[in-house]
Amino acid sequence: MIRKNPSGDLPVIHESAYVDNTAIICGKVVIGENVFVGPYAVIRADEVNERGEMEPIVIGAHSNIQDGVVIHSKAGGLVKIGEHTSIAHRSIVHGPCEVGSNVFIGFNSVLFNCSVGDRSVVRHNSVVEGCHIPPGFYIPSTSNIHSDSELADIAQVTPQVADFSESVALANHELVKGYKKLQNEF
């Protein structure tokens, strides 16, 4: 469902993107080229700051927002997802938050008030808040990172992990083409 927010903002969705008809896209949202938005995802830009303003939620080209993901922002803060990035099933990205390009966010992870650098991986059931993850970092499953100082023991992404992340992005890119083709059959 595509709908306006109370401020009257309507989502802008590139014609090549696929948004499942069970997803909810509300308000000041920009979805780029060849993006996949899976079933029951919610991307909602509707809160304003104390001045009555809000930044957009931007999903970069060739990214995928999988089943049940929630993306929202407190007090109209910016949420930006880079290109070729995968946000896996049932994750929450709550702004203000910036996620770089070629990033993988694993199942059930929570990002809040943070930034995640390009080519980083946050594995399943992890929480990242109030910190800046530099490019190329690997956050293991079930990690809880709440400050920059907690990153001292975190490793860089290995080639095997990077290959996995890329394979997920490519698989979802193919889903965009397949589902767009199916839309034309009905």
Image: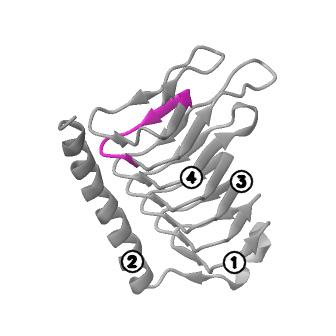
| Residue type, mark 2 in image | Phe
Element type at mark 3: strand
The residue singled out by tag 3 in the image is: 112
Q: Which mark is residue 69?
A: 4
Element type at mark 4: loop
Q: Earlier in the sequence, mark 3 or mark 1?
A: 3
Q: Residue furthest top?
A: 8
Q: Is residue 24 magenta?
A: no
Q: Residue at x 71, y 28 (%)?
A: 47
Q: Residue at x 61, y 48 (%)?
A: 70
Q: Residues within 10 Å of mark 1 (few under 14, many from 20)?
A: some
How many labels sit on residues?
Answer: 4
Above or below, comparing residue 160 to residue 68 in the picture: below
Residue 71: horizontal and vertical position, in percent? 60, 45
Q: Earlier in the sequence, mark 2 or mark 1?
A: 1
The residue singled out by tag 2 in the image is: 164
Q: Earlier in the sequence, mark 1 or mark 4?
A: 4
Residue 16: horizontal and vertical position, in percent? 26, 38
Viewer-nearest of discs 4 and 2:
4
| Residue type, mark 4 in image | Val
Question: Left or right of 72: which side holds 172?
Answer: left
Residue 87: horizontal and vertical position, in percent? 51, 58
Report the span colored magenta.
26-36
Q: Tell me if label 2 and label 1 are in contact, CB under 8 Å.
A: no
| Residue type, mark 3 in image | Phe
Q: Earlier in the sequence, mark 4 or mark 2?
A: 4
Q: Residue at x 56, y 74 (%)?
A: 137
Q: Is residue 35 magenta?
A: yes
The residue singled out by tag 1 in the image is: 142
